[in-house]
Image (spheres, rainbow, N blue to C red):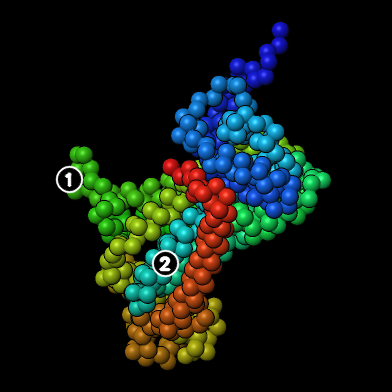
């Protein structure tokens, strides 16, 4: 004997959880879309003034505490139908009036609209977090144009650089992440409402007007694509994934720098923890959490991508109720990671003397010695490289630095004669300061160049702030406009479900 819908098993494993998720993530969006749709239906004279007023007042009369407290019992399919029933009750049982609200729309276009409305909140928060983190990097870079540091390749000391050059590299990467997040937001912030089930409607609706009321930049175009497409969240997740990979790599750098063996960064006391047994410990737990949160978020983004791969191009549950919370969870963890990173580094200090010593140690200046030999002696770089390499092997474990005498003996061994370079020229070529300062090439380490690069990044920061402020203002104005329209009819402010 077959059970009536919903079967108990289906209710417990699908509908009950989806109902709780919908209350948590979408209640505010449901109400906002209902209000905007009602306004548009009235302006298009699809519903009467009396119906319009009654519908708005019914929406305003919703008891949100009651909605949040409601446990799923199977008497309705989902939050949409539950809210429709409550609106009918608030219309005094007048189904004819309350039912008019659903004119010219489907749960399909309603759902993808509320998904976008919900997603853009987290997208804006993540953008703000990434911008704040970049500002921390730029502020630190501005203090360290002359701070010498060792740069590493393959985890080994490679060449001298500066802290500014190093931090600007991270800021530059974050700048590209920010632009990717901006593009993802712009492509997401288009309104699918009015697409209906998948082919629009025969009613004379105004899709541009409802997009305006909801703070979208414009409607989506093709109604089939409006329902079937998922790139609105895939692009957001793609941009987030790129950011997370960068965050994880940056965090690993600072975690290594905080090791006692490296001892070049000291985190603020508020971001380290002691040990229950070892009194001396200053564990850099904040950076560990940054890395863990970024990894957790990355795992969720990749999980969403795997879940939607090869799903049908149309309305399908695979990309809807069960999946959507994973998207918001991934973004929330990404937001936590970037925010924690900014807070941790904002008051961090660097061991400048240790960095300077290491910028001169381990033979990491000798690339410039080879270049100087090429310039001074007119020798091929291959030969200069061999002379310097021979010098390094001769000095290693003994002086542990190349002297003028060692270099000349190496030159005699390689080319059969001494070099014409003076001892002063040799010492200058081996100086970390000289190494950094001579690299005035575009993108190089010289303080003059890092100051120019910082100015470019500051201008990008300024433009991004303008984009962010304009976007937030646009969204806020749309919300205020909708609130005012509703208030003019009902005399009450729009309900808010912000918890």
Task: Give left or right: position of 53 versus 315.
Answer: left
Q: Nearer the viewer, residue 135 or 295?
A: 135
Task: Give left or right: position of 277 versus 326.
Answer: left
Q: x and y percent of residue 408 in the render? A: 39, 83
Q: Which mark sits nearer the N-terminus, 2 or 1?
A: 2
Name the residue rendered at 57%, 33% in the picture.
90
Name the residue rendered at 66%, 42% in the picture.
51
Task: Count the numbered circles shown.
Answer: 2
Label placed on residue 279: 1
Q: Is residue 337 above or below residue 84?
A: below
Q: x and y percent of residue 102 in the render? A: 69, 39
Residue 174 at least partly seen? yes
Q: Nearer the viewer, residue 302 or 178?
A: 178
Q: Is residue 430 above or below residue 41?
A: below
Residue 306 at least partly seen? no
Q: Nearer the viewer, residue 370 or 61?
A: 61
Q: Secondary structure at mark 1?
A: loop
Label placed on residue 135: 2
Q: Is residue 458 above or below residue 242?
A: below
Label placed on residue 428: none
């Amino acid at each position: 004997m077959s059970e009536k819908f919903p079967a108990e098993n289906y209710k417990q494993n699908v509908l009950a959880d989806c109902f709780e998720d919908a209350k948590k993530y979408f209640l505010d969006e449901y109400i906002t879309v209902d209000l905007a749709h009602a306004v548009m239906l009235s302006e298009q004279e699809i519903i009467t003034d009396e119906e319009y007023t009654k519908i708005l007042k019914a929406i305003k009369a919703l008891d949100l505490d009651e909605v949040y407290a409601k446990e799923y019992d199977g008497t309705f399919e989902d939050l949409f139908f539950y809210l429709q029933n409550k609106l009918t009750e608030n219309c005094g049982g007048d189904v004819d009036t309350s039912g008019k609200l659903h004119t010219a729309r489907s749960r399909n276009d309603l759902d993808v609209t509320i998904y976008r409305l919900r997603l853009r909140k987290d997208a804006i928060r993540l953008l703000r977090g990434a911008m704040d983190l970049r500002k921390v990097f730029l502020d630190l870079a501005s203090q360290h144009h002359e701070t010498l540091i060792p740069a590493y390749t393959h985890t080994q000391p490679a060449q001298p650089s500066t802290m500014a050059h190093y931090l600007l590299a991270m800021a530059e990467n974050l700048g590209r992440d920010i632009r990717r997040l901006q593009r993802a937001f712009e492509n997401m912030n288009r309104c699918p409402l009015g697409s209906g089930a998948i082919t629009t409607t025969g009613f004379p609706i105004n899709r541009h007007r409802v997009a305006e009321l909801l703070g979208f930049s414009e409607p989506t175009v093709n109604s089939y694509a409006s329902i079937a497409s998922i790139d609105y969240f895939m692009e957001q997740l793609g941009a987030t994934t790129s950011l997370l990979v960068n965050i994880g790599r940056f965090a690993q750098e600072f975690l290594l720098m905080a090791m006692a063996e490296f001892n070049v960064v000291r985190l603020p006391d508020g971001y380290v923890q002691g040990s229950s047994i070892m009194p001396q410990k200053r564990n850099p737990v904040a950076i560990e959490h940054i890395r863990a949160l970024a990894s957790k978020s990355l795992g969720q983004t990749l999980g969403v991508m795997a879940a939607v791969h090869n799903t049908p191009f149309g309305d399908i549950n695979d990309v809807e109720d069960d999946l959507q919370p994973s998207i918001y969870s991934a973004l929330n963890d990404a937001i936590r990671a970037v925010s924690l990173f900014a807070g941790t580094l904002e008051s961090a200090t660097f061991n400048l003397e240790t960095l300077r010593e290491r910028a001169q140690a381990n033979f990491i200046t000798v690339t410039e010695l080879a270049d100087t030999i090429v310039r001074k002696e007119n020798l091929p770089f291959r030969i200069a490289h061999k002379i310097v390499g021979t010098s390094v092997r001769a000095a290693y474990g003994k002086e542990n630095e190349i002297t003028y005498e060692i270099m000349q003996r190496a030159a005699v061994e390689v080319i059969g004669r001494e070099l014409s370079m003076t001892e002063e020229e040799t010492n200058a070529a081996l100086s970390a300061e000289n190494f950094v300062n001579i690299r005035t090439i575009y993108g190089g380490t010289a303080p003059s160049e890092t100051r120019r690069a910082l100015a470019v990044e500051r201008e990008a920061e300024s433009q991004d702030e303008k984009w962010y402020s304009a976007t937030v203002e646009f969204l806020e104005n749309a919300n205020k406009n909708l609130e005012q329209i509703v208030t003019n009819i009902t005399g009450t402010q729009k309900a808010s479900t912000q918890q």
